[in-house]
Amino acid sequence: MELKGEVALVTGAGSGLGAAIARELAAAGARVWVSDVRAEAAERTVAAIAEDGGSASPLPLDVGDPVAVQAAVASVREQDGPVDVLVNNAGFDVCTPVEHQTPEQAQRVVATNLLGPMYLVANTYPSMLERNHGYVVNTLSTAARRVWTEASAYAASKHGLRAYTTALFKEAQRDCKQRHGSIGVGVTGLIPGGMATPFVTDRFPDADLTKLQQPATVARALMTVFATWPDSVVPELAVLPPGESSW
């Protein structure tokens, strides 16, 4: 598929699924801004994209900081134009029972997983709406459909993000001008099942890797969503390994 000329911003793109999505977008011709709270990780993804012949720039960013988000989006706009494709993928979790969870831990989980996407949408979606052109992808989780122990804040943040994504989808349906049957701004909630990424393996070192899927597989599946745009939109996409037990 072709995304040549589109400006894409992917958060949490220093590794795992975010890096895989950034590489797929670049391969499709987008100019990708690789955002991560870890500057060195963002640089590694940029280097990998450059080796593949794609266009990418690093964007160190803590998505939970609204002032930093506003400044980062303004910087992208000044250097490269308005964001056409936003992928909110940054995520954080603390595996601890409720009684041991600190306010600081809960705040960081919610700020990264829920408030961060809201801040980024607030700074990019108005331009998309004005131009009647753009796409927002929010990475959810199977935790947006169910819960498990030692992940209360994470599940709460992902349930909230799923609700926010659905509301944004409905507003885009209502507010975007329909042109020849097409919708100008698309919104998708991406639900990836278990993946062989540091986000999973660092938290669950005993995880059975044979039951996990590769992030590149999920990234390729996401690209089919862009292939339908702007004639159709996919409000939610679940990509699961065959043995996913949480579905």
Image (cartoon, rainbow, N blue to C red):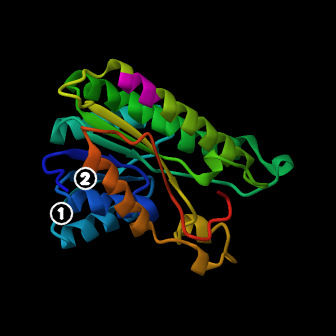
Q: What is the x, y in percent for residue 185?
A: 30, 32
**Within 10 angstroms of label 2, few (less than 14), some, or many (20 or more) residues?**
many
The quarter of the picture where residue 202 lies is bottom right
Question: In this image, 5 relative to 231: left or right?
Answer: left
93 with respect to 32 (left or right): right
Q: Quadrant of residue 161?
A: top right
Q: Amino acid at mark 1?
A: Gly
**Measured Cα–Cα span from mark 2 to mark 1:** 9 Å
Q: What residue range appears in magenta?
A: 168-173
Residue 155 visible in the shown view = yes
Residue in the picture at 27% in, 36% down: 134
Q: Residues within 10 Å of mark 1 (few under 14, many from 20)?
A: many
Q: Which of the labelled discs sits on residue 32, or is there none?
A: 2
Could you say where residue 33 lies in the image, as x and y percent from the top left?
28, 51
The circle on residue 54 is 1
Image quadrant occupied by the C terminus: bottom right
Please state which of residues 38 and 205 is positioned toward the viewer in this rendering.
205
Of the numbered discs 2 and 1, the one sitting upstream in the chain is 2
The answer to whether 128 is drawn above or below residue 240 in the figure is above
Front in this rendered view, residue 29 or 235: 235
Q: Looking at the image, which residue is at 29% across and 43% down?
A: 85
Residue at image x 23%, y 29%?
Answer: 181
Give, as a three-letter code, the residue at label 2. Answer: Val
User: Where does the image place residue 46, in percent across and percent down from the top left?
Assistant: 27, 63
Quick one: SS at disc 1?
Answer: loop
